[in-house]
Image (cartoon, coloured by chain):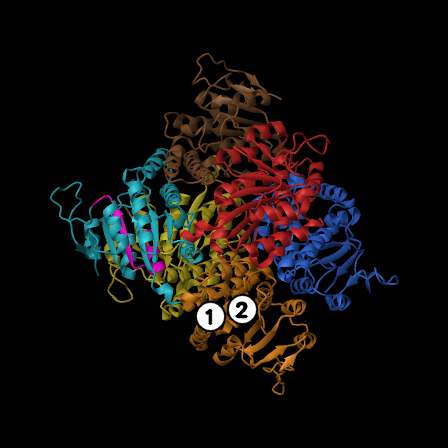
Chain colours: A cyan, B brown, C red, D blue, E orange, F yellow
């Protein structure tokens, strides 16, 4: 099956704050045009939960709901985001949102005219970043691109420390130290979490952390030089 | 099985605008206290999609998504609302959101210590009001109470005609004429739709249309005199 | 994906009385030959329940079974009819009977060498006519053809009024008046029901009501002039 | 759990020719009264396909459908029969038709107020008699009663040989010889087939073959002396 | 669809003792090379449970577990064997293990670039040999090859009787006599069982019994002269 | 529902090396007797994959299978172990192995006479230890007990450093340092992994690490003083 070997596979995690933002339509369009330009490109998009997830989780939290169930609520919101994005992408997208890793892997094989699948979270105790890394493993993806609310990895959280510097490359060990003992709160800060990092490390997945905007998503899908932070091994 | 015959079964449709409103916590509490007061009460709550559904649908519509898929997006939002409500209700609620009529019927039978199930939409082309009527048929419910944004059925839409009068009782035929040729737009006006009305009629379901607030929900669950509009045959 | 745009998609509702009738083999053959003649034709067939459904429903009714469950029995019979038709159609048909709208939509995408899917009812409270309309929406079908026991829409029920005249074209409003306040009895008269009509209206689906025989099915699939009644907007 | 040990479990295979026969209502009533009389009785009913199955299979056969698919059509009809019987039995019955052995076993455990489950065929290549034997194994049933169109096992087929004698007891070996090299045609003669016999033998299931009428079903459920043929080891 | 008619379909049952044996890698490689050599070849592999199944079953038996559940444990082991084989075969294989006959049939249709599916047992009371025969029926396979621990069918069990002679051809009747009254113990002797034989007979499936080694598997897949025993009608 | 509040819920992770060991029967018996002694005890057992998982994974690895799929193979083995354990435990156990967190939570609610559920892994990228912690969160368990191959947490790996000292209590931070940068290899060392630790921390789950033998399991289930290492916050 030599044709299949030539396919380029990109896993793209989209920040949940994208949905309902002004950027949404532009991102849909850059995905559509990237796909049209390169018929051999296969894309797995992982949608985050974003502010909407945090709102729903906040309601449930007021009633003392346990953490695993809060995770499940966050997953439900990310899947809703995924459904809307898949619908907006139209003909090129698998028409439903897979709920297991197996379904993700099957979808791009079974639907031969489809070039793209959109999913949300898969399982409690696992962020959508970790989902992105797992999907990259399973699909033997060429790269995993995490599109976040920031420009990349900084020496410190740029929202708190104005003097923080962006890193072009970072090792998993460094990134782990920068992330520190970050909590696993459902709907939390989404740069990269320890579980995702462990998966990236065990399979040496080529990973970039970029800002979620039209220009960078275009770069990420075309495979040209990507502006952001690369994780190196 | 004489014990089961004594159970009182109420189907309660909650307007989707309840979620994220100030009324939410009060409604959760009145359901909890009604359930505690009457251990023989079984409740099936149907959550509407509300403004959140309309927002998601609006995004998809911008990209030319078909009506059946817009319905599916509306259903996904109503199920998310249902999940959060079920979680907030805690111990008394079936811990998941059923996706078929069969699952609804089974849930209250299989989980004997549970007194309540929360669901959203079930199927495209069918409003959450029609879902409420179907569930009432399947469970042979004692009554179906539709909690909406208005006080009951008026001679005309009270939001447009200040002189409209509230009706205490209404026949299906009258209600059908008042509703007129209302469209079946996904996420539309939720007083009662023609499909729901047909189901109510074919099974002669005891139905009330009430305002979605703490006091009326309390009345609806206790079975005392309910303030609103009753559908009579 | 320009090729996909050229596909012609027809949704064909077949009267349940077809099964076990003399016409059955001829209809199977005309579907097979239409499909062979036009490789770009995609067909979704919706099988009705027919007399067999009415018999099973009558048994259950004797024991006081509720309307929603009677609907479920009717759906089960229509799916059995669908299974036999799909098997008879052989190689060109998806080999199973989808149970949700999503499965219908996926089936023709996923099985690229298949040109046809056969389904029965999908959900209680929704006739197989409404199912046909929903499928037409979801697949963005070129036309929806309802093959019934009569020649088309008449000014009155032709089985009761010999002087009734067949209409070539009818508006949804007119048709709604002709149908009158028809009941939603499970397994009832299958010309067109209010729910199906609402869906046809909201999506402006090109719809024909024809007699279920070899000649008209052939016309309906080839897209040549169709003898029957067209719904116009 | 000492209470559970006192439960009496009977697996009852009902001939498919029962459905639509005059006997149907009487059988429903004798099952209802037997269950009411003995609250510790748990019943798993397996519905055969009968003449309706043979009719549907005959249609498919005309089009050259393979044997495994013909089995699947027969299973679909037996499940439809089961659905109608379960609905007719009302409150005492699990409200759906299980499709796997696991679902059968779970149903009576999970629904504590239910005393009965009705199923049809489970899997191609396996008659509903074999299904009855499997269910008896899985539930560790007290007895398996196969209610057929004949009075019991005869020395020869009583429909062909008027001089055939009914046997009160029969060993698996004898029965195997009487059955001879009977074919496994979908929807075939339903006294007992080699697969069912192998299962009965490996688990030494107490088995009776009786006529499917009110009196014998009553005996079979009460556990009083059963008129028919017993399989002895 | 003339292209599909040219496809060659082989069902290959692999003895469960293959897994963890030295032969495993060689068999994987001969399947890969056979598939590469003939792009029109479609293979359904049925994995047996083997010694691993017998070990797990022995543990459960010590605790008095019923026969149907022992069958389920055997099926679980055969599916695990199938999962590992499917993973090892990589790109040419459907990436999951189907659990129903319908899933088997669909898999090779839906995944057009896949040439092979691997499954284990499907249902209690049915050996993996019978599964192979059912799959052969459903796929209208060109041949069913049962790769066992012995060279073919002998006049007597060659492991007990050194003078036993291998038969080149055998009729179902002869084979049935040779097999005698073999028990249906879960995880038992796997030459061929009565149920499998009945299925082979009813559909006149071209069947070979061969030794499970590289050379014979190669012959079985290429369709050249196969060394072993052929079942003739 | 005051009765439910009195239930004691213990999550017990069992080392995969238990299966096929001499200890197996003793552990089954101590679970049975603990359950009989305390009717209010509810137990969720998580079975590890153990040496059998490592063997199957090693076979797949030889063929270059990706890490996510290796995880899936490990999960399949742990579920097989769970199936055998559930079968051996007999009447007190839910009769199947749940595959999602939701199924785990539902099982103990739905089957009121069952006191125990046995599961294996749930999702790739998540060890069975993390599964134990998630289940403890979801069930609001009284404690999570991880029964391993060692006596508890040591200052260093006791298998490599004979001078290592066992700790009675350990903080998550300390344990994290002791575990170091341990890899997430499928089927790896099972003391406790970073993901499990994060979950334990976020929900402050009362956790013990003990040796997997009869005496300690008995202590863990009775809630008397548990010999091993406690995680303290």
Asked whether residue F40 is in view, the answer is no
Residue at coordinates 55% horizontally, 51% vertically from top-left? C117
| Residue F208, percent from left and from top | 34, 52
Q: Residues within 10 Å of mark 1 (few under 14, many from 20)?
A: few
Q: Measured along the vertical axis of the image, is residue A14 above or below residue C153? A: below
Residue at coordinates 76% horizontally, 68% vertically from top-left? D174
Q: Nearer the viewer, residue C2 or B231?
A: C2
Q: Which residues are magenta?
A: A126-150
- Does D219 appear in magenta? no
Q: Which residue is mark 1?
A: E39
| Residue A224, percent from left and from top | 23, 56
Q: Nearer the viewer, residue B184 or C192?
A: C192
Q: Nearer the viewer, residue E95 or A193?
A: E95
Q: Measured along the vertical axis of the image, is residue D112 above or below residue C171? A: below
| Residue F120, percent from left and from top | 43, 56
Residue at coordinates 31% horizontally, 42% vertically from top-left? A16
Asked whether residue A175 is in view, the answer is yes
Q: Which residue is mark 2?
A: E6
Q: Residues within 10 Å of mark 2 (few under 14, many from 20)?
A: few
> Residue C130's image quarter?
top right
Q: Secondary structure at mark 1?
A: loop
Q: How many marks?
A: 2
């Amino acid at each position: 099956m030599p044709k299949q070997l030539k396919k380029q596979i990109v896993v793209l995690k989209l920040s949940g704050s994208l949905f309902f933002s002004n950027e949404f339509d532009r991102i849909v369009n850059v995905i559509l045009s990237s796909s049209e330009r390169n018929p051999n490109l296969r894309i797995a998009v992982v949608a985050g939960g974003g502010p909407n997830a945090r709102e729903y989780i906040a309601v449930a939290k007021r009633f003392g709901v346990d953490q695993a169930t809060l995770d499940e609520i966050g997953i439900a919101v990310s899947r809703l985001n995924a459904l809307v994005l898949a619908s907006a992408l139209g003909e090129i997208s698998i028409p439903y949102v897979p709920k297991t890793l197996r379904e993700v892997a099957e979808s791009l094989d079974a639907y031969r005219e489809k070039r793209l699948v959109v999913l949300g979270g898969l399982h409690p105790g696992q962020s959508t970043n970790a989902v992105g890394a797992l999907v990259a493993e399973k699909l033997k993806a060429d790269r995993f691109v995490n599109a976040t609310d920031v420009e990349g990895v900084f020496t410190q959280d740029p929202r708190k420390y104005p003097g923080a510097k962006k890193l072009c490359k970072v090792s998993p060990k460094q990134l782990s130290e920068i992330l520190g003992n970050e909590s696993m709160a459902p709907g939390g800060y989404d740069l990269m979490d320890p579980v995702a990092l462990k998966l990236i490390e065990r399979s040496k997945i080529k990973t970039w952390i970029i800002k979620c905007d039209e220009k960078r998503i275009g770069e990420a899908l075309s495979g040209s030089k990507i502006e952001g932070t690369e994780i190196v091994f």
